[in-house]
């Protein structure tokens, strides 16, 4: 996939009005913008054929199940006792956690900097709107200034720990996006703690040595540990 092709697809995506049936117009766009047919499948949901990992796509039935069975979800527990107003997801990926927060009543603003991952996040946003959730997908890095939210979620890429085998989607994300450098850790953690009014939630593989993070508490999930940090 060339950068030019992807940029064209994204530009078209971003000018599309929110609630229309976008798979149809995407099909047209693929002809106009000559997006390679072997790369995209223009039906709902969008999918990408990775030569090594096979089909990569959003799993909306899994998301539906997660949103309907929220009470035991570690992210639900991490949001207890705070007002469900605005939440920021600074590392949104496919938007699974962002949608989950939106299903709890938060107005969620989710940022993803990787262009091809962002396309999937945009699709998740469209899906979320159809469920009546408030989720806005933003491309790039979250702005630093004048942006406050009750909760700030961080789920950066970590080095592989070698424990549980990551899902296919996660393996693909790993092949696309690099783990944070020490500087990114310092910058983003500080930013998140300045932006959060009530708490920062950091999602990490179990037993990860978190650079610079001193959680006040943590919730152990099946594959992740959810670290809760106080704002500055
Ligand atoms: C582990 S994934 C997030 C998965 C997500 N929580 C979900 O439920 O699908 C991390 C993502 O964060 C993105 N990312 C990392 N640093 C970022 C930054 N500073 N701004 C925006 N996106 C970032 C990466 O490109 C990657 O797609």
Image (spheres, rainbow, N blue to C red):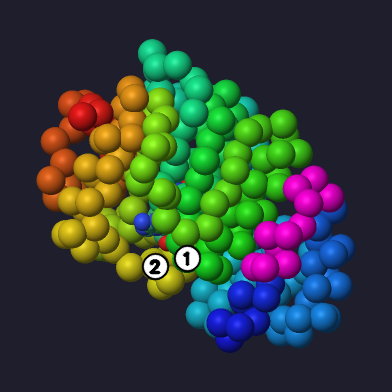
Pointer 1 residue Cβ closer than 8 Å to ligand 1? yes
Badge 1 crowding class, 10 Å Cα cut-off, few under 14, some 14 to 19, many 20 or more, is some
User: Is residue 189 visible to the viewer in this orientation of the structure?
Assistant: yes
Residue 39 placement (x, y as % from top left): 67, 79
Q: Is residue 4 left or right of residue 189?
A: right
Circle on res. 179? none
Residue 12 placement (x, y as % from top left): 73, 67
- Which residue does the image show at 47% across and 59% down from the upper left? 140
User: Is residue 170 visible to the viewer in this orientation of the structure?
Assistant: no
Give the quarter of the figure containing the C terminus: top left
Pointer 2 residue Cβ closer than 8 Å to ligand 1? yes
Q: Quadrant of residue 78?
A: top left
- Which residue does the image show at 17% across and 47% down from the upper left? 210
Secondary element at image label 1: loop
The reply to whether the C-beta atoms of the residues labelled 1 and 2 are less than 8 Å apart is yes
Secondary element at image label 2: loop
Q: Is residue 11 magenta?
A: yes
Give the quarter of the figure containing the N terminus: bottom right
Label located before the other in sequence (1 or 2) = 1
Q: CA–CA distance between discs 1 and 2? A: 7 Å
Determine which residue is flagged by label 1: 114
Q: Quadrant of ligand 1?
A: bottom left
Span of residues in magenta: 10-20
Note whether 51 is above or below 94 in the view shown. below
Q: Is residue 156 left or right of residue 48?
A: left
Determine which residue is flagged by label 2: 177
Q: Is residue 115 left or right of residue 230?
A: right
């Amino acid at each position: 996939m060339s950068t030019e092709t992807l940029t064209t697809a994204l530009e078209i995506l971003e000018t599309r009005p929110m609630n229309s049936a976008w798979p149809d117009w995407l099909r047209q766009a693929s002809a106009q913008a000559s997006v390679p047919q072997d790369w995209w499948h223009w039906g709902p949901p969008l999918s990408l054929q990775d030569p090594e990992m096979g089909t990569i796509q959003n799993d909306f039935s899994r998301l539906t199940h997660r949103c309907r069975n929220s009470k035991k979800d570690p992210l639900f527990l991490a949001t207890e006792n705070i007002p469900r107003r605005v939440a920021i997801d600074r590392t949104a990926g496919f938007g699974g956690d962002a949608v989950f927060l939106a299903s709890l009543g938060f107005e969620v603003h989710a940022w993803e900097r990787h262009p091809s991952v962002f396309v999937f996040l945009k699709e998740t946003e469209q899906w979320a709107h159809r469920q009546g959730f408030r989720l806005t997908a933003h491309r790039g890095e979250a702005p630093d200034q004048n942006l406050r939210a009750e909760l700030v979620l961080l789920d950066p890429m970590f080095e592989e720990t070698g424990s549980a085998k990551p899902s296919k989607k996660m393996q693909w994300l790993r092949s696309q996006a690099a783990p944070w450098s020490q500087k990114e850790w310092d910058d983003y953690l500080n930013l998140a703690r300045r932006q959060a009014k009530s708490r920062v939630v950091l999602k990490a593989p179990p037993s990860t040595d978190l650079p610079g993070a001193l959680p006040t508490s943590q919730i152990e999930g099946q594959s992740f540990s959810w670290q809760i940090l106080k704002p500055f």
